């Protein structure tokens, strides 16, 4: 017997289907899930599309957070005034696949796939984002820094009866800037070999807080905690020079054909992304 397919129109209906199914699979944009199903990488006896749940399709700002609904496409995000101030996120979205895929793919799906080289997820991680997960048991908010099972790719802390209903990004404050850089063999539609996301807060030109994500270097996205600590109190040149001359050991590169290449380019990529974050601060202050 093949898999059953459902397209609930309400959250309540979707949550009931999830809780009563033996092996459910959420279908959102489907750009990853359908391919993985076809290749046998994932299985599901109950396929549940959440595309018709209207409350998941909004982008709004409230109480210091920008909230992106779970079914919002990357294409819709790219046209949102609320997200345009996050220059790093704009660049990450522009790098993601092709325009046709961006019209179908969602940020929530990019996160839940849990690939080590996911452009939008990598930048959302650097922005200090959290996700809302909901089941019939209740709702919980999980920071992206705690969302992934860091020992293996394509694995998260989500339970099988949970839906990622929205993504929460802390609103950009005065003196904050963001940046994103990715390196790949081709400019488009290619998996990145190195990706870096940065969010900085500054006061009088000095870094007071930093959030850094490193992608495509290990089994999951990596939190650049040691680099974050090191650049606190530095100005733009000092932070750039530090990143350029220090390999971020927290990356813990896994062995691959590109390991030596990544060792060589990761410091300069991080330095350039810090520079982009400072530049976005200057542009906001004009």
Image (cartoon, rainbow, N blue to C red):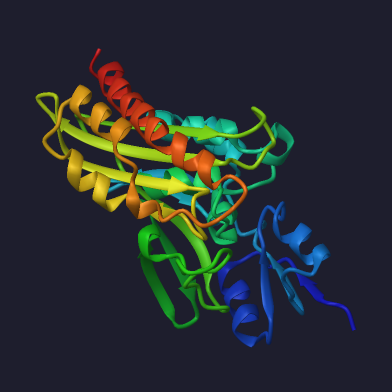
Whether residue 274 sits left or right of residue 133 in the image: it is left
> 229 or 56: nearer the eye?
229
Q: In the figure, is residue 39 to the left or right of 227?
A: right
Q: Quadrant of residue 282?
A: top left
Residue ID at (9%, 24%): 204
Q: Residue at x 61, y 38 (%)?
A: 96
Looking at the picture, how far across and down is residue 8, in whole percent? 68, 68
- Give the x, y percent position of residue 143: 35, 61
Seen as rendered, the residue at the extreme right is 1
If the image is split into quadrants, where does the N terminus sit? bottom right
- Name which residue lies at 53% across and 68% down: 152
Q: Is residue 80 visible?
A: no
Total numbered circles: 0
Q: Quadrant of residue 189?
A: top right
Q: Position of residue 226 (x, y in %)?
A: 25, 50
Asked if 146 appears above or below 84 in the picture, the reply is below
Percent across and percent down for residue 145 are 36, 59
Tell which residue pokes out farthest to the front in this image. Answer: 260
Nearest to the observer: residue 244 or residue 7: 244
On the rendered structure, is 221 left or right of 97?
left
- The residue lying furthest to the top in this view is 286
Q: In the figure, 258 relative to 279: above or below?
A: below
Q: Is residue 270 above or below residue 212?
A: above
Give residue 41's quadrant in the image. Answer: bottom right
Q: Vertically, is 142 above or below 174?
A: below
Q: In the depicted view, which residue is nearer to us: 256 or 16?
A: 256
Residue at screen point 18% across, 43% down:
230
The C terminus: image quadrant? top left
Whether residue 273 can be seen here: yes
């Amino acid at each position: 017997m093949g898999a059953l397919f459902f397209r609930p129109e309400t959250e309540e209906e979707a949550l009931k289907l999830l809780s009563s199914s033996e092996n459910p699979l959420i279908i959102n944009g489907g750009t990853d899930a359908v391919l993985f199903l076809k290749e046998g990488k994932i299985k599901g006896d109950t396929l549940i599309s959440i595309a018709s749940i209207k409350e998941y399709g909004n982008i709004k700002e409230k109480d210091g957070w920008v909230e992106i609904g779970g079914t919002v496409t990357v294409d819709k995000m790219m046209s949102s005034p609320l997200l345009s101030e996050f220059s790093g996120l704009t660049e990450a979205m522009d790098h993601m696949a092709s325009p046709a895929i961006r019209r179908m793919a969602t940020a929530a799906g990019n996160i839940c796939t849990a690939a080590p080289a996911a452009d939008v997820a990598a930048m959302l991680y650097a922005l200090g984002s959290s996700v809302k997960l909901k089941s019939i048991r209740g709702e919980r908010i999980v920071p992206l820094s705690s969302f992934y099972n860091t020992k293996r790719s394509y694995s998260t802390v989500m339970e099988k009866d949970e839906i990622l209903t929205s993504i929460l990004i802390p609103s950009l404050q005065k003196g904050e800037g963001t940046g994103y850089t990715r390196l790949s063999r081709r400019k488009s539609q290619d998996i990145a070999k190195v990706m870096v996301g940065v969010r900085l807060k500054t006061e009088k030109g000095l870094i007071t807080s930093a959030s850094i994500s490193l992608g495509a270097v290990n089994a999951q996205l990596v939190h650049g905690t040691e680099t974050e600590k090191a650049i606190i109190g530095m100005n733009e040149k000092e932070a750039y020079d530090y990143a350029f001359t220090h390999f971020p050991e927290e990356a813990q590169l896994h062995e691959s054909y590109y390991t030596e290449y990544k060792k060589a380019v990761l410091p300069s990529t991080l330095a350039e992304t810090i520079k982009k974050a400072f530049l976005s601060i200057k542009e906001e202050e004009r």
